[in-house]
Structure formats: C-alpha cells, structure tokens
Image (cartoon, rainbow, N blue to C red):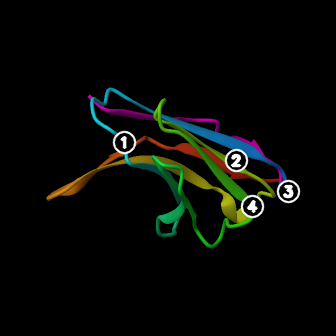
Amino acid sequence: QVQVVESGGGLVQPGGSLTLSCTVSGNNFKINRMGWYRQAPGKQQEFVASITSNGMPEYGDSVKGRFIIFGDSAKNTISLQMNNLRFEDTAVYLCYADRWRIGVPDEDYWGQGTQVTVSS
C-alpha cells in the first residue's frame, strides 16, 4: 500500500522560514512527480510547487521567489524550503505523488497534510 507522509509543519513568525518534507513508501513503481498543494480555511486548494523525477520544478505564483522545492527521486522524498513566510501562507500543506503511464489515467497519491501557521 502506497503511503505519503508529510512532516515539518508548525508555527512560525512572519518573515521566518520553515522546511516541509514528504516521503513516499510502499510503491513498487516509479514516481514521476511529487509536489505540494495547500488548503486554507474558506479558500480553494492552491498549487504550491512540484518537481519531476528528473528535477524540473514548478511553482505557484504566490510562492515564486520565496519557496524552493528539492527532490531525491531515488528516495522518493521531497522537501519544501519556505522563506519569508507571510500570514497568507497559513494553511494545511498536502503532499502528493504522481504516477504516469502511457495509455492509462494518471494515478495520484496524497498525504494527510501538515499544518503551517504563520502568526506573530
């Protein structure tokens, strides 16, 4: 059974930094991409960042220049370095993993989420 487990959430002051990690286990297939979405109360789920197995990153507009995503495809692990955090970054951060296969729908696997709270 595939498991996606996040860690590293917590409370941080505005302007501070925090690093989230995510690891996939239980898979007997290649993970093609991993990334993060976030869900804040009363708001739609928002794309944060992703990285492919060959190291290509993407970022949501609201985090560009502040967040950096790193990946280790051999270990099915990613981390998200969040810098210069703002009140509006407060959310549950959800890690996901994609499996791509030709001719069949993509498979997504999701973690339970980790809370990030930016507060003074």
Give the quadrant of residue 115: top right
In percent of the image, x 27 and y 29: which residue is there? 28
- Across and down, in percent, residue 10 comes to 69, 40
Q: Residues within 10 Å of mark 3 (few under 14, many from 20)?
A: some
In percent of the image, x 19 and y 58: which residue is there? 105
Q: Residues within 10 Å of mark 1 (few under 14, many from 20)?
A: many
Label pair 2/3, CB-CB below 8 angstroms: no
Mark pair 1, 3: CA separation: 33 Å
Overall secondary structure of the magenta stretch? strand
Q: Nearer the viewer, residue 11 or 8?
A: 8
Q: Amino acid at mark 1?
A: Ile
The residue where tag 4 is placed is 66
**Which of pointers 4 and 1 lies earlier in the amino acid sequence?**
1
**Which of pointers 2 and 4 lies earlier in the amino acid sequence?**
4
Highlighted range, magenta: 1-13
The residue where tag 1 is placed is 31
Label pair 2/1, CB-CB below 8 angstroms: no
The residue where tag 3 is placed is 15
Q: Amino acid at mark 4?
A: Arg
Q: Is residue 6 above or below residue 87?
A: above
Mark pair 3, 4: CA separation: 10 Å
The residue where tag 2 is placed is 81
Q: Amino acid at mark 3?
A: Gly
Determine if the magenta segment contains residue 11: yes
- Across and down, in percent, residue 57 comes to 56, 58
**Which of pointers 1 and 3 lies earlier in the amino acid sequence?**
3
Label pair 2/4, CB-CB below 8 angstroms: no
Q: Amino acid at mark 2?
A: Gln
Q: Is residue 51 above or below residue 41?
A: above
In percent of the image, x 69 and y 65: which residue is there? 88
